[in-house]
Image (cartoon, grey):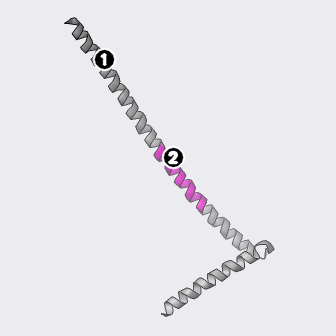
Amino acid sequence: MSELVEIVDSLENKISKLLRKLELLQQSRRNLEEEVAALKQAREDARVAAEKWEEKYNSLKMANSMLGSETNKSEAKLKINALIRELDQCIVQLAE
């Protein structure tokens, strides 16, 4: 009978150790999920910042081309023509 009690005690100890490990792993998982969420937010913030800088760069490039820079003159002309076509389309739609 005492062997049975020892086996039960041993099983109880092992179960309590497993439950403790389970709690530690669950906490670790929660911490990792929080870290992943923070990294996703940081990545999104970086993407938005990169888009803003790209817009600023394109604006500066366009401004430089309009100031007479020979390297971007044709690009500026193409952009102006595209804008004019868009305006023409808007005018046609408004006239209908």
Residue drawn at the location 78% of the way across and 77% of the way down: 68
Going by the image, does 16 lie left or right of 78?
A: left
- Residue linked to disc 1: 13
* Whole-percent x, y for residue 37 in the image: 46, 47
Assess whether residue 43 is covered by the magenta stretch: yes
Assess whether residue 22 is covered by the magenta stretch: no
Question: Which dot, 2 or 1, sits closer to the camera?
Answer: 1
Residue drawn at the location 31% of the way across and 22% of the way down: 16
Q: How many marks?
A: 2
* Whole-percent x, y for residue 48 in the image: 55, 59
Q: Which amino acid lies under the numbered mark 1 shown in the image of this protein?
A: Asn
- The numbered dot on residue 64 is none
Q: Identify the element where label 2 is drawn.
A: helix
Does any portion of residue 13 appear in the rendered image? yes
- Residue linked to disc 2: 39
Say which label, 2 or 1, has the lower sequence index: 1
Q: Which residues are the magenta region?
A: 36-51
* Whole-percent x, y for residue 56 in the image: 64, 66
Q: Which amino acid lies under the numbered mark 2 shown in the image of this protein?
A: Leu
